[in-house]
Image: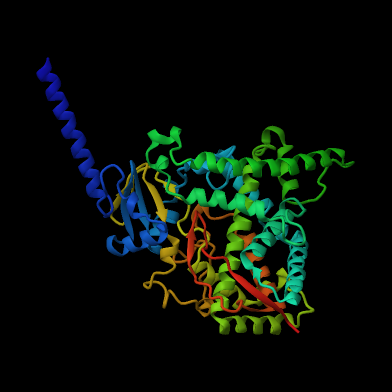
Amino acid sequence: MEVHILLLFVSLTLIITRFFQKRKKNKPPGPTGLPIIGNLHQLGPKPHSSLSSLAKTYGPIMSLRFGSVTVAVVSSPTTAQQILQKNDQSFTDRPIPESVAAQPNVNDTLAWAPADSRWRNRRRICTTQIFTAQRLDLLQHLRHRKVQQLIQHLHKKAEERTSVNIGEVAFATMLNLVSNTVFSEDMVDSEFESAGEFKELVWRIMEDAGKVNVCDYFPVLKRFDLQGVKIHVKVSYLRLHEIFDRMIRKRVEDRKSSRSGGSIKNDFLDVLLDDCEKDEASVFSVQSIKPLILDLFIAGSDTSGSTIEWAMAELLHNPEIMEKARNELIQVIGDKSNQVKESDIPTLPYIQSIVKETLRLHPPVPLLLPYIAGNDVEINGYTIHKGTQVLINVWSIGRNPEFWDDPLLFQPERFLNSNVDFKGRDFEYLPFGGGRRICPGLPLANRMIVLMLASLLHSFEWELPKGVNHEMLEQYGITLKKLTPLFAVPISVV
């Protein structure tokens, strides 16, 4: 009996060993990891940069092991196309990090929820009822008003000859732009002094989501929250949900007291609440719209505000480019008495090229949110096995000399007379992602970023404070922000 058990054990061991050896042979190449932790030690404080360096050795798709999790890292346009387009049905879902799972109703988000029928319906409603050109045009007067409030604030600073924290005012303005689009009201006062708490809450979420959390790579440890990430970030989620809950409940009461019983503001919140009232046919509830609204605020305020800061930093380091941009604005818009409007955006190709070049060098999310393989898939002759997580390094793709001339130089001209765009069809340029998970708020983000940057350049000349030289260093979270805040002095145009 004991001999039979021993023979069975040896046979099973050989079968399992051969199975994993076969799997290993088919996996993409990658660096040998350490026992237990695998390649976690090779990520460093800037994973996007570390993985880009490793890709130079191991190729456009490489395999790493983070604890007990196998991860494939994609660093070329053709390989990204294999994931996002040719095999997109196999890469629809995402692994949810513990820092993200800390939020209420995580399965009602657009960014992280499984791509099931409920997710598809929510996304369809957002795409057709919120982010269409018609809906965006309907509310553009609100965004114009918010930008003008920023310009008025900056004129006061210009009179005082004081420097401005570009990231702070950009975040606050973007926050109000999103807030007016969703709620038809401000989150920040006219002096831009009340955005601090919201910005701190959002950055805590983004920073914690970008941290290497051992609990994500050793599932057996999840319940212990060894690094305290989940308990740390949960406070931010609950506070933001509390803010949104108060505003939603107030709107629900206003709608009840309305004589017509219909929409009152005709903003995004009313669109969502209209759908909630469809009873069984609705894909939303008052509770489930809060995670969606949180997605909109984070994507609209944090990533868009950061893009403005990076754009201004690049322009201050390249004054000749800033001058070209201002000349275009003078020719198209006229003097400072004329306000830049969203309808002017198609006539400002150089401003649009500056935004595109900023997004190439400083993509808001340097590593696209991870995908997880739903089944075994062959990519470039290698097998991505079911359950493997996939990271697409758009930061690396955007700086690859195989696809971009002088990739480290800030050259907006590369996008003039170019058909390359960020709508997910050009796989060498994916700042908003691609495939069925492409950022649905892209049309709104593009309008807000271009409008705000054009307004800053049209109304002011800019200079760095004396003795200050801002380095272009990055701080990694799930989004990429500037390590040292950008301060600049606005000079009102005569």
> At 63% from the left edge and 67% from the top edge, which residue is drawn?
166
Quadrant where the C terminus sits is bottom right
Q: Is residue 410 left or right of residue 8?
A: right
Q: Is residue 316 left or right of residue 13?
A: right
Measured along the vertical axis of the image, is residue 102 above or below residue 202? above
Farthest right residue?
259
Report how many numbered discs are placed on residues in the image.
0
Measured along the vertical axis of the image, is residue 5 above or below residue 480? above
Residue 233 position in % (x across, y down)? 55, 43
Measured along the vertical axis of the image, is residue 301 above or below residue 348? above
Residue 30 position in % (x across, y down)? 27, 54
Measured along the vertical axis of the image, is residue 61 above or below residue 388? below
> At 74% from the left edge and 82% from the top edge, which residue is drawn?
334
Residue 326 position in % (x across, y down)? 65, 82
Residue 351 position in % (x across, y down)? 61, 75
Q: Is residue 390 left or right of residue 272?
A: left
Quadrant where the N terminus sits is top left
- Between 447 and 183, the one lying in front of the other is 183
- Between 359 and 86, the one lying in front of the other is 359
Report whether residue 267 is seen.
yes
Farthest top residue?
1
Quadrant of the image occupied by residue 162 = bottom right
Farthest front residue?
467
Q: Is residue 265 left or right of residue 179?
A: right
Quadrant of the image occupied by residue 242 = top right
